[in-house]
Image (cartoon, rainbow, N blue to C red):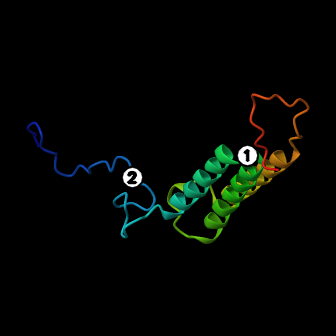
C-alpha cells in the first residue's frame, strides 16, 4: 500500500525506541518526593562539608564515612532508591561500605602537621 508523508504503513509495527527508566513516570513520582533517599544522602554530605569548613577534616571525614554507611543501608533495605541504584544491590552496598571504610581510615590516619605555620589555621578537629 502506498503511503503519504507522515502516515504509517499498515502491518508495520512501530519501534518502541528507548524504554522509560526504571521507576518510570514523572520525575517526582507518585508522591511528592520520589528521590528522598538521595536527598537524605546529599543532606548528610552537605552537613559533613559544612563541618569540614567550620571545624576540621577529622570530624568531617567521620561524617562522610557515616554518609557512605547511610547510603549503603538505604540501598540495602529500601526497594526504590532512585539514583542510588547504579549496579546490582550487592555491588552497590559492597562498594559503598568499602569506600566508607576507606574514607574513615584515611581521615583517622592523617598525622598532625610537623610544622606549625602561623598563617595556616589549625582546624584539625582535636
Answer with left or right where residue 62 lies relative to residue 108: left
Q: Residue 114: tell me if it is visible.
A: yes
Q: Residue 84: tell me if it is visible.
A: no
On screen, 112 above or below 32? above
The reply to whether dot 2 and dot 1 touch (C-beta < 8 Å) is no
Give me the disc on residue 19: 2
Answer with left or right where residue 19 lies relative to residue 84: left
On screen, 111 above or below 101? above
Answer with left or right where residue 58 lies relative to residue 52: right
In terms of secondary structure, where does tag 1 sit?
Answer: loop
Viewer-nearest of discs 2 and 1: 1
Query: Residue 122: x and y, percent?
Result: 78, 39
In terms of secondary structure, where does tag 2 sit?
Answer: loop
- Which residue, given by chain and number where applicable, does mark 1 sit on? 56
Counting residues from the start of the chain, the first of labels 2 and 1 encountered is 2
Q: Quick one: quadrant of the N terminus?
A: top left
The residue nearer to you, when weighing 116 against 78, is: 116
Answer with left or right where residue 2 lies relative to residue 37: left
Amino acid at each position: 500500500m502506498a503511503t503519504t508523508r507522515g502516515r504509517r504503513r499498515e502491518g508495520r509495527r512501530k519501534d518502541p525506541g528507548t524504554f522509560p527508566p526504571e521507576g518510570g513516570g514523572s520525575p517526582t513520582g507518585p508522591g511528592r518526593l520520589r528521590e528522598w533517599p538521595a536527598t537524605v544522602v546529599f543532606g548528610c554530605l552537605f552537613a559533613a562539608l559544612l563541618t569540614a569548613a567550620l571545624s576540621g577534616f577529622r570530624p568531617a571525614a567521620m561524617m562522610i564515612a557515616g554518609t557512605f554507611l547511610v547510603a549503603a543501608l538505604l540501598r540495602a533495605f529500601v526497594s526504590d532508591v532512585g539514583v542510588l541504584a547504579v549496579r546490582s544491590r550487592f555491588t552497590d552496598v559492597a562498594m559503598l561500605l568499602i569506600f566508607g571504610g576507606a574514607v574513615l581510615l584515611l581521615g583517622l590516619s592523617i598525622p598532625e602537621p610537623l610544622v606549625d605555620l602561623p598563617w595556616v589555621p589549625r582546624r584539625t578537629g582535636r
